[in-house]
Image (spheres, coloured by chain):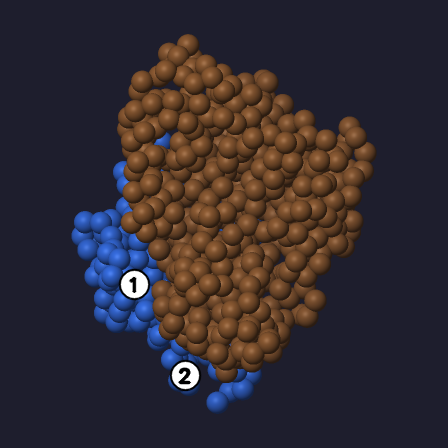
Chain colours: A blue, B brown
Amino acid sequence: MDVNRKLVVGWLYGATMNIYGDRGNVLAIEQRARWRGIDVEVRQIGLGEPIPDDIDIFFWGGGQDQEQVAVSRDIQGEKGDRLKAAIENGAAMLAICGGYQLLGHEYRPHDAEPLPGIGVFDAVSVAGPERFIGNVVIDSPEFGTLVGFENHSGLTELHGDASPLGKVVVGRGNNGKDGTEGAMYRNAIGCYLHGALLPKNPRVTDWLIKAGLNRRYGMADLETIDDSIEESAHRSAIDRAKATR
Amino acid sequence: MTDTNAVATGRTATRDARLVAALIASKVAGNAIRRMGRGGGTAAPGLVAERLDPGLLRKLTSQLGEGAVVVAGTNGKTTTTRMIADVFEAVPWRVVHNRSGSNLVRGVIAAFIQRASLLGSIGGDIGVIEADEAALPELVRRVQPRVLLLNNLFRDQLDRYGELDTIAKTWRAMLQDLPADATVVVNGDDPTLVAITDGIRARRVCFGLNEEKHRLDALPHAADAAICRVCGADLGYHALYVSHLGDWYCTGCGRARPALDYVGSTIELHGVTSLSMRIGEAADGDHDIQIGVPGLYNAYNALAAAAVSREAGVSWDVLTGAFDAFRSAFGRIERLTYRGRELTLALVKNPTGFNEVLRMLTAETGGLQLPTMIAINDLDADGRDVSWLWDVDFELLAKGEGTLSTSGLRGADMANRLKYAGVDVARIHQLDTDVSTALDAFVEAIPEGEGGYILPTYTAMLALRKTLAERGAVTEFWEQ
């Protein structure tokens, strides 16, 4: 095995969009790569800063309304085009909540102008009348059972080309109506699952790492590691979700 | 107000029939609940009374000759409220205080009912009211306080309170309605609180630290207010003390920490027991205080309590005397002996609070040297979303030798958090999710005569204290 492998993680708007412990997702990518001897460099990509060429895995978390406006403006034009191109070329992406919404075509707030997204997902989000707050369990064709915590009032509708991340087993999901949660396109995943998602759903973390390695090296062998603590957190979160639904 | 004519002030009893009916019904309910052993019976009587007389709280608080103080803030509410109440009792004033920590509107009503006579006389000189963040605007509207303390605003239980912006907006609306004769005591080190109190009619009094020794190198991950609420530019800090609290300035519009009316400096922290500090009052010079609570976050609480006490007209002599005698509130930090082991319990309820507890426990040793049990529940009062654990800087626990045990309904999430913080998995012990069962296993692993730390969330703390009380190690909380 190549002992000098490395990955570059691009953390979009980490200073302004970082609520609900989403930082745990970046930590999970870093640690699970390092435990396999893969070096990880995390680069912050803030307001006004360009998208670097060599990002293997992007992460984009949720933000408060005030911050979402500034970010929507910032991601238009060349910056958004470069991010889209990176995803078309196989870069991995995990976007949660506000980041997920801006990966769609637009987000329409209650009483303000729509915030344009960049249309990676064929999806539109609209501010809804109630806030969905609670544990979520979904059944994903790619990853099996995933568990997290949702806290959003935006309702996301997927259109023609978008495939959901999974079907809701417990909770409300994208819009509380069609039973879908999240979206996937190429190596990009968007969803409403806080928790943080990756530490207790390590299959998703490893999938993102493999996608990143594939982009950088054209191959991605990843040794298995002892996930007993992760699995225990995964199972107990599912049990709590089912007990409190 | 239709009720003012019906209410006599001071000790004279009123003949308000609706008020009397509400008082009788709720007192009966409170006694019945306590006899059935259903917790402290702290909030339900308030619900009964509110139904019968919606004007009850205003009728009772308007009788207080010295008015009322309302205390709000994400962290340190209960401790700060108790400090203020103890100072007022030393005046001596007769203090009406929601002491058992029931800080929603109904809990406050219940505390006032418990104190009132059946004829509706409150029999107190001053009210000291701890307010939940979400309940604050409603409580202020009903109580019309003479002094309102805004101590801090941190990220906390997003599933319950919503985002920080939401709280800040509702507070801002409430603050703009305050009359000119009210005083708002504000933590000037908190840029959010300063922004929402700019330009209000009420008199604003600010406190903050000018401290050399206890500074942070960078904003912790849990910090929220890194951008200016007025112009949106990044905030900078000449000095940073706790989370986003410090000597701040805006890199865009040039706003900065306001002039301080009360300044804390030369803080000495004495382990998990006490602290001392110099407080400079702009109008009255320097005064040294010491108080039996630990950690830098409690220096802020003591400074806030001192500022409120001075604004309410208390002398420095009374204030320093009351601080000398003060000890920590239920469960916030508590030391006890159980089965021959010295246990230190410290409540952890949100990222900033947890960070400060870890900072206190590791200050002298680098990492945690004693065995530690962290008990995380996800019931309503704890916050149902355990995502917040990822905003706590557990990375500093990767150093140190002590075992780290986990318990509670989300003990497995906690164990996982420690693993990703870089803690050696051999040090992580997953104990039973039931905290009482876990307590025995944890204590048995500690050699007799030695000590350990227990860090529970709110409902885990309640469960632990119940077990410890049944076994004679602590007293039950509503007996304070």
The image shows residue B381, relative to residue B108, as above or below, that is below
User: Residue under circle 2?
Assistant: A226
Q: What's the distance in space between the residues labelled 2 and 1, CA to CA?
A: 23 Å
- Residue placed furthest toward the left: A178
The answer for which chain carries disc 1 is A
The reply, left or right, for residue A16 in relation to residue A120 is: right
**Residue in front for this viewpoint, B264 or A189:** B264
User: Residue under circle 1?
Assistant: A240
**Residue kind at label 1, given as amino acid type:** Arg
The reply, left or right, for residue B99 in relation to residue A84 is: right
Answer whether residue A156 is visible to the viewer in this image. Answer: no
**Residue kind at label 2, given as amino acid type:** Asp
**Residue in front for this viewpoint, B441 or A7:** B441
Look at 72% across and 48% down and name the residue there.
B290
The reply, left or right, for residue A135 in relation to residue B360 is: left
Which quarter of the image is occupied by the N terminus of chain B?
top left
- For numbered disc 2, what is the local secondary structure? loop
Residue B169 place in picture, x, y as percent: 47, 33
Category of crowding for the residue at label 2, using alpha-carbon neighbours closer than 10 angstroms: few (below 14), some (14–19), many (at least 20): few
- For numbered disc 1, what is the local secondary structure? helix
The answer for which chain carries disc 2 is A
Residue B228 place in picture, x, y as percent: 59, 39
The tag earlier along the polypeptide, 2 or 1, is 2
**Residue in front for this viewpoint, B425 or B411:** B411
Category of crowding for the residue at label 1, using alpha-carbon neighbours closer than 10 angstroms: few (below 14), some (14–19), many (at least 20): some
Look at 49% across and 20% down and name the residue there.
B11
Answer whether residue B359 is visible to the viewer in this image. Answer: yes
Look at 50% across and 83% down and name the residue there.
B426
